[in-house]
Image (cartoon, grey):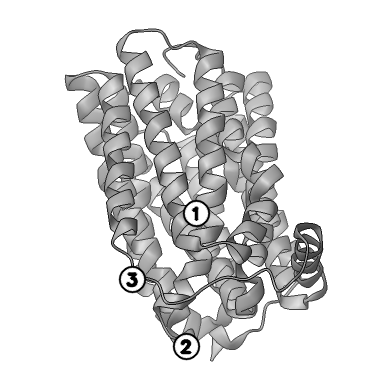
């Protein structure tokens, strides 16, 4: 988008278009995952994502992509992700014993962030050496490989509607998420963190281009160091949780993220950028991994996909609203001001979150 329309509003709109489908459809997608075969749903979403990213690669290679076209295709990718994410997260407890769910979520976070550390750097090299279309083409190949893994997965668990209508199943999942105090506090925690923290992801491409003067390779390095910070944070997360408990850990990790934003806003130079992005990766990973694992521990199996759909709706809604908000703030007052305001807001919300404690079995 920075090459098509480099205004803060349009760059931030990419993140908004990715998040909006999750806001609208994550809960219905969770209902589907609780009623239909999860493996087949995952295969269908990977096939859709494969087709869309392959189309994006072709259109980009032919120089036929427009800003609106990019946003529309990003929206469709979001539609595929809205079914994939709650379905996959609800499948984790099938693969490990309940007591190991926090470690499994942490390991998944390490895997994801290792990919995020290496992938963007490779993408930057591909874009510089071959062209933007090549990154989309490799992305399409990655979906094909996941599809191959899913084809070989032999599940023994089966889903059932239990005789309930789709609407009744939806209400049941929402009711649990609202009435269960731990799950309710998890979703409030997600909103209080992601709403200000989304300033990082929505403005990072523009920050790399305008403040640092970096191209695709530089942006890849930025995202890569955030992923490195997340991996480092994941390595010490279990010990920190045992020593501090989930609630104190969340306050600490939100503060770490806010400090990273402050450093990024006032010291946009080489070594300080490295320090800030590592802090940001550690704070992002520790906060969301703790909230995600708490949600998965709290949700009963029959409601797990619906509950994770509620979780993702809150996360994506906060991301979409935050991306729009920080795009407007950056357009009015500049990138540094937007990052500093977001950091201050995050400090405030970290104190507000203390009124909604978790206090779960993760702390024992």
Numbered tag placed on residue 241 in the rendering: none
Using the image, determine if residue 212 lies above or below residue 344.
Answer: above
Instruction: Report which residue position mark 1 lands on.
Output: 41
Q: Earlier in the sequence, mark 2 or mark 3?
A: 2
Mark 3 and mark 1: Cα distance apart in space: 32 Å
**Foreground residue among 266 and 354:** 354
Left or right, 195 with respect to 234, comes to right
Left or right, 169 with respect to 196, comes to right
Circle 3 or circle 1, nearest the eye: 1
Task: Report crowding for label 2: few under 14, some 14 to 19, many 20 or more residues within 10 A (C-alpha).
Answer: few
Circle 1: element type: helix
**Foreground residue among 337 and 119:** 119
Circle 2 or circle 1, nearest the eye: 1
Q: Position of residue 134 (x, y in %)?
A: 25, 25
Instruction: Report which residue position mark 3 lands on.
Output: 235
Mark 2 and mark 1: Cα distance apart in space: 27 Å
Numbered tag placed on residue 99 in the rendering: 2
Q: Residue at x 73, y 69 (%)?
A: 185
Circle 2: element type: helix
């Amino acid at each position: 988008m920075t090459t098509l329309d480099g205004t803060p509003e349009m760059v931030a709109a990419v993140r908004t278009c990715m998040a909006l489908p999750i806001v609208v459809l994550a809960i219905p997608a969770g209902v589907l995952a609780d009623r239909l075969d999860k493996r087949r749903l995952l295969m269908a979403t990977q096939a859709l994502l494969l087709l869309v990213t392959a189309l994006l690669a072709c259109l980009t290679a032919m120089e036929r992509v427009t800003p609106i076209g990019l946003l529309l295709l990003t929206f469709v990718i979001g539609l595929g992700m809205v079914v994939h994410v709650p379905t996959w997260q609800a499948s984790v407890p099938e693969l490990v014993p309940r007591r190991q769910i926090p470690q499994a979520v942490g390991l998944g976070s390490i895997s994801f962030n290792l990919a995020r550390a290496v992938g963007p750097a490779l993408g930057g090299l591909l874009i510089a050496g071959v062209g933007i279309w090549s990154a989309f083409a490799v992305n399409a190949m990655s979906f094909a490989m996941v599809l191959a893994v899913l084809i070989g997965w032999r599940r023994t668990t089966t889903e059932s509607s239990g005789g309930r209508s789709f609407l009744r199943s939806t209400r049941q999942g929402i009711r649990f998420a609202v009435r269960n105090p731990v799950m309710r506090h998890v979703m409030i925690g997600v909103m209080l963190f992601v709403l200000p923290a989304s300033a990082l992801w929505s403005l990072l491409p523009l920050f790399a281009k305008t403040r640092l003067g970096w191209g695709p390779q530089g942006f890849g390095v930025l995202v890569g160091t955030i992923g490195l910070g997340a991996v480092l944070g994941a390595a010490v997360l279990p010990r920190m949780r045992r020593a501090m408990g989930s609630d104190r850990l969340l306050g600490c990790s939100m503060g770490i993220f806010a400090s990273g934003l402050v450093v990024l806003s006032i010291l946009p130079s080489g070594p300080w950028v490295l320090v800030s992005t590592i802090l940001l990766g550690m704070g992002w990973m520790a906060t969301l991994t703790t909230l995600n694992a708490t949600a998965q521990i709290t949700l009963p199996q029959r409601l797990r996909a619906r509950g994770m759909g509620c979780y993702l709706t809150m996360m994506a809604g906060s991301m979409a609203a935050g991306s729009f908000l920080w795009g407007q703030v950056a357009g009015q007052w500049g990138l540094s001001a937007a990052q500093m305001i977001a950091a201050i807001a995050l400090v405030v919300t970290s104190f507000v979150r203390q009124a909604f404690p978790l206090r779960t079995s993760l702390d024992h």
